[in-house]
Image (cartoon, grey):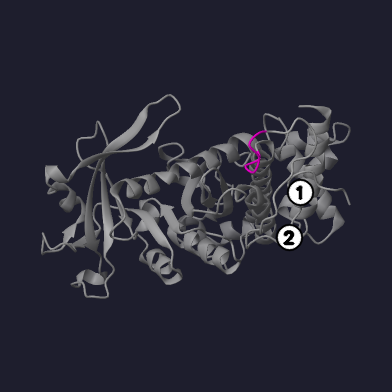
Amino acid sequence: MSTLDLAEADDRLDVFLDHVTDPLATLTQKQMFAAYASGLLSDAERKSMEPLAAQLRPDAPGAAHKAFCYFTGIAVWNDRAVRRQGLAWALWGMTARGEVLGTIIDDTGILKQGKHSVGVGRQYTGSAGKITNCQIAVTMAVYTARHAALADVALYLPEDWTSDAARLAKAHVPEDVVFQTKGELALEMLKAAYRDGVPLGKILLADGDYGRLRRLRRWCRDVGMDYGLGIHSDEMIWDAEGVWTKRLTVGEAAAMMDRKRWRRITWKVGSGGQKLSGRFAFMRVQITKGGKEPTEETPVEWLVIEWRDGEPAPARFYLMSLPADTSRTTLVRTLKERWRIEMVHQELKWEVGFDHFEGRSWPGWHHHATVALSCHALLIAERCVDFPPWASRRPAAGPYRRPTRPAPAVLPSKHPNPGRPARA
């Protein structure tokens, strides 16, 4: 990177920090946020507070560590407001070429060895592929055709935590926090983002742990948002095409599916030319509450059944609210956009130390998560600067120029230019 490029990046970092810390109340909080973020953005191998403090103040690591502990664990500041500022920065670059297409809900595990970190317990996480000692973070990302950025995150508290008042108090969990399933946490984040004007796109994607929540599907219909959600094999359905006139489980319908209804569909061709494909079957179905027969008001939806190569039977099922005339290939390719949030989780952990936090308290975990999300938002925006979507190729020298275009609805009216910003 040239001296000019380094100067531009340094300028953008300064403006980013001014922007993302705007909701913080004091200059000290802004300075601590900047120092902590710089540590998470560094090339340090371990990004917990102690090594970051030693890196920041090799002459006085103890004092720096104490300051970090205070900033994350005791200082009062609004996580949601800061996260919105970080997302706004990412969206400015992400939406230069196209709008937000949709939202993805998922969760990721943070492996732990002890039993005192807030929310920790033996629970299943797809990150490890087994039941293990971990925390579970429910995540919500928005995506465009090229990028995805995390919009929010919530820590899941198992019931053995929410039923133990002493344990909650020791971890400084607010008194109004009660047990919520991962689906309920996701719905709460979606509602908050919708109220705040975050662009959520046209479709919500999630796996079966979230698709089972009827209230989530109903909320999407209420706000005019489509969904492609995983469902479990025991979900009861009615055949809207009238082939089967009794109520069946999804698993039963898949087992009785005629061989002629299975189609091989390729949803992606890799950089090496390899095709990602599988066998799929499709039905128009209705789902009712309590097993009642469907009425004219009952929505008719797509049931998509996936039978992966090498599996003895179909094992993945999805419910989609897209129109009846949607092509089968479009249905599958839309569902497969969920891979984006897996990449976000990987980047959060590998690049900005999302899973490196060693504090035990509820405020500490959330403050750390907020700084990590903000740092990831900066990295997303930097990709848009380094490879500007509005330019066919990089100019030989000088600042990037962006076209005149409206900012996304979530952005403040004075959002800075992610090209070469002017110093205050």
Identify the amino acid type marked 2. Trp
Read off the magenta span: 388-393
Q: Is residue 266 left or right of residue 5?
A: left
Q: Which mark is residue 77?
A: 2
Q: Which mark is residue 184?
A: none
Q: If you read the primary sequence from the N terminus, does the residue marked by circle 2 or circle 1 appear first? A: 1
**Residue 71, x across and y down, in percent:** 76, 51
Identity of the residue drawn at 11% across and 59% down: 243
Q: Which mark is residue 16?
A: 1
Identify the amino acid type marked 1. Phe
Q: Is residue 411 left or right of residue 306?
A: right
User: Picture quarter containing residue 3?
Assistant: top right
Q: Is residue 176 above or below residue 250?
A: below
**Residue 343, x across and y down, in percent:** 52, 39
User: Picture quarter containing residue 302?
Assistant: bottom left
User: Picture quarter containing residue 42?
Assistant: top right
Label the magenta part by its dominant secondary structure: loop
Q: Is residue 284 left or right of residue 341?
A: left
